[in-house]
Image (cartoon, rainbow, N blue to C red):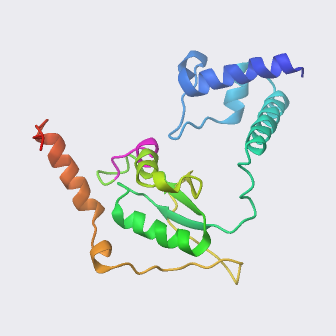
C-alpha cells in the first residue's frame, strides 16, 4: 500500500471513529470500541490493509516520541498509582509525593469508572485535567494512563516489583472523596455566588 493510500484510510478511521461513526452505520461500545470485522466491512477494506495502516501509524508515533526523548523512560524504575480519583484531592497528591520520592517517576493509572454510579461523576478527561493542575510543578516526573476498571491485582511469586502500602498523616488519611463530591454538588446546586474583593 502506498503512502497516499495509508493517509487516506487513516483519515477515514480518525473521522469516523472519533467524530462520525453513524455515517458508516457504526455503533461504538463504551470506551469507543468497535469489532474489527465490523470496522473493515464498514470501510470496505481488508483486515490486512487495516493492519498495515495501524502498523504505519504506530511507526510514525514512535518516531515522534523518540525525536522528543519521550521514550527514554522505558526500562527505568517507576511507581504506579491506581485509582478512580473521583475527584483527585490532596490525599492523592500526598501519596504521589511519597511515590515520587521512592522511584523518581510515577505512572498514575486512572480506572475507567465514569458513569458507574453517582460516585463516579467525572470523565477521564476531567480527572486528567485535575491531576495535571495539581501536579503542575512536577511536569516530566509523571504520566497519566487511562486503565480499564481494574478491580483485582494478581501476582504469583517474586516478580520483580513491590506492592507498598504508604501510611500518611491522619489529617491526610481522613480526606474523603465522598465528602468532596457532596460539597461540589452543593456548590453547583446553590448556583453562582459573588466573591468580595479584599
Q: Is residue 65 above or below residue 157?
A: above
Quadrant where the image shows the N terminus: top right
**Numbered label tally:** 0
Residue 23 image position (x, y, % from top left) = 57, 15
Q: Point out the residue furthest to the right here.
A: 1
Whether residue 40 is situated above or below residue 125 in the rendered picture: above
Relative to 31, 167 lies left or right: left
Residue 30, horizontal then vertical, whole percent: 50, 40
Q: Is residue 197 left or right of residue 6?
A: left
Quadrant where the C terminus sits is: top left
Residue at 52% across / 65% down in the picture? 81
Decide: is 183 above or below 83.
Answer: above
Give me the residue at 40% from left, 57% from top: 85
Residue 42 in sight from this viewpoint? no
Residue, far bottom: 157
Q: Nearer the viewer, residue 96 or 101?
A: 101
Residue 179 falls within the magenta-colored stretch: no
Q: In the picture, residue 84 is in which quadrant?
A: bottom left
- Quick check: is 122 in the magenta stretch? yes
- Please tell me which residue is depicted at 61% across the width and 79% down the height of the picture: 162
106 and 11: which is toward the camera: 106
- Image coordinates of residue 99 in percent, x first then y, are 52, 71
Residue 80, image x and y in percent?
A: 57, 66
Decide which of 94, 126 is in the foreground and name it. 94
User: Which residues lie in the magenta part?
Assistant: 120-127
| Whether residue 110 is visible | yes
Q: On the image, which quarter does residue 39 sit in?
A: top right
Amino acid at each position: 500500500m502506498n503512502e497516499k493510500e495509508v493517509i487516506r484510510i487513516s483519515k477515514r478511521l480518525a473521522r469516523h471513529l472519533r467524530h462520525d461513526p453513524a455515517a458508516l452505520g457504526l455503533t461504538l461500545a463504551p470506551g469507543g470500541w468497535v469489532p474489527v470485522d465490523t470496522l473493515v466491512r464498514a470501510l470496505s477494506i481488508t483486515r490486512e490493509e487495516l493492519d498495515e495502516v495501524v502498523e504505519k501509524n504506530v511507526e510514525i508515533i514512535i518516531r515522534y516520541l523518540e525525536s522528543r526523548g519521550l521514550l527514554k523512560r522505558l526500562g527505568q524504575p517507576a511507581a504506579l498509582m491506581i485509582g478512580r480519583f473521583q475527584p483527585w484531592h490532596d490525599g492523592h497528591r500526598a501519596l504521589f509525593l511519597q511515590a515520587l520520592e521512592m522511584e523518581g517517576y510515577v505512572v498514575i493509572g486512572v480506572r475507567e469508572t465514569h458513569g458507574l454510579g453517582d460516585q463516579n461523576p467525572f470523565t477521564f478527561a476531567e480527572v486528567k485535567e485535575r491531576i495535571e493542575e495539581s501536579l503542575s510543578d512536577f511536569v516530566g516526573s509523571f504520566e497519566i494512563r487511562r486503565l480499564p476498571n481494574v478491580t483485582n491485582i494478581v501476582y504469583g511469586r517474586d516478580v520483580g516489583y513491590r506492592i507498598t502500602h504508604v501510611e500518611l498523616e491522619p489529617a491526610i488519611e481522613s480526606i474523603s472523596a465522598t465528602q468532596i463530591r457532596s460539597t461540589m454538588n452543593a456548590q453547583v446546586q446553590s448556583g453562582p455566588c459573588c466573591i468580595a474583593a479584599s
